[in-house]
Image (cartoon, rainbow, N blue to C red):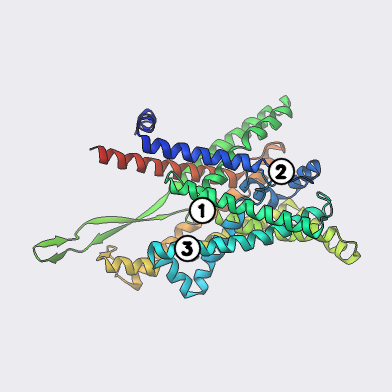
Amino acid sequence: MAGFGVIRTLVRDRDLRKKVLITIGLLLVFRLFASLPIPGANQEQLRLFFEQNQYLGLVNIFSGGALANFSLAMLGVGPYINATIILQLLTMIFPSFKQLYYEEGEAGRAKFNQYARYLTVALGLLQAFGLLNLLRANGIIGALGPLDTIRHITLVTAGSMFLMWIGELISEQKIGNGISLLIFAGIVTEIPLALRNNIATFDPSKIPMYLVFLGIALITLAGVVVINESERRIPVNYAKRVRGMKVYGGASSYLPLKVNQAGVIPIIFALSLLMLPSMIGQIFGASKNPALLNIAIQIQNITNNQLVYGLSYFVLVFAFTYFYTVITFEPHELANNLQKQGGFIPGIRPGDTTAQFLSKTLYRITFLGALFLAAIAVLPLAVQGITGVTSLSLGGTSLLIVVSVALETIRQLRAQLVMREYDTF
């Protein structure tokens, strides 16, 4: 459908227009809430601290800059994302969780999401406590009494739960995934600030490097779109079944296996693990114990080595992509469902043979997806090393999130428009 046709339908269709306006309004509420600061932080030290810590920089992206502002929404939707990931990992360990998530339909998913909310509260309290201690150890906020500490932890946790609720309200509009759109809005709102900073530090002698950066950015954008939309289509045939006077089945379809099955989750896993030594080193660095100070210095020397950091980051993202794909993809479950529906892959026996074929095929195409995600993860380091311009930052993770969310939102919006066209017909 042409762009003008989409706009015309949005203007004319009252229900769809209402959903879009509600979504925009909720995103504005999120941005307003993210700008409400908690008093007591040294803003200049806070800014410098986030520039030096890449893990907290990623968390700050997810919170839409709220963390760097010491806002009520400083944790963003991070606790909810972590809670969902933990519960998905538990489906591999506990069969009851696996049955709840995969076999009990919408009721099971609703109960699973309820458990995720409970775990979000616990993780929010834990992360708020750890973050406040980290900021206090680095002199960004002053010493807090017991009541002040409890108040700050409660406010920050409540802010994260409020954002989770906004995300669920957005998801109910069926225009896009609410949590993803909140992260999308947080990343997009940082673009004007980044442009302003680069314009203020513009150096005419580095124009060729700026052009190289622009070319890499465009190539990366095209690559993200291609890889994100790429899929291996496995043909599936359905056997004919005769019931009474009617014939069922006999149709052909395909099973899509995405090249990037894991999304951005492996990058988050790898960065969390990689930045853990750095956070430990910073906490030990605030200690007066000579042994702890020596450990902190050694850790900082290793983590500040860009070559070691880049190679470790690349390997971890590559490994976690396979790990998360194994968790989320159930070849035996899929093969059983195909067999129950009378479907089969041409040339492949139904049952275990089909499951083995699906696993083998997925692991092959995942190699390309894992390689792509690992390259995206280390892209900022590579671009700054090639161009020599440190003021420019091409965030591969941010770019991947923005493109993925935009494509998914457009896909859902088109589905809404197509449904309304059929109703009109």
Q: Amino acid at mark 1?
A: Gly
Q: Which residue is mark 1?
A: 263
Along the polypeptide, which appears first: circle 2 or circle 1? 2
Q: Position of residue 23 (x, y in %)?
A: 48, 41
Callouts 2 and 1 close, C-beta under 8 Å: no
Q: Which residue is mark 3?
A: 328
Task: Residue at 70% x, 54% y: name it.
Answer: 309
Mark 1 residue crowding within 10 angstroms, few (<14) / some (14–19) / many (20+): some
Question: 13 above or below 364?
Answer: above
Q: Position of residue 385 (x, y in %)?
A: 70, 42
Q: Which residue is mark 2?
A: 37
Task: Residue at 23% x, 61% y: name it.
Answer: 238
Q: CA distance from mark 3 to mark 1?
A: 11 Å
Secondary structure, mark 3, is helix
Residue 400 at least partly seen: no
Figure quadrant of residue 4 = top left
Q: Amino acid at mark 2?
A: Pro
Tell me: 136 left or right of 155. right
Q: CA distance from mark 2 to mark 3?
A: 38 Å
Secondary structure, mark 2, is loop
Secondary structure, mark 1, is loop
Query: Residue pushed farthest top?
Result: 204
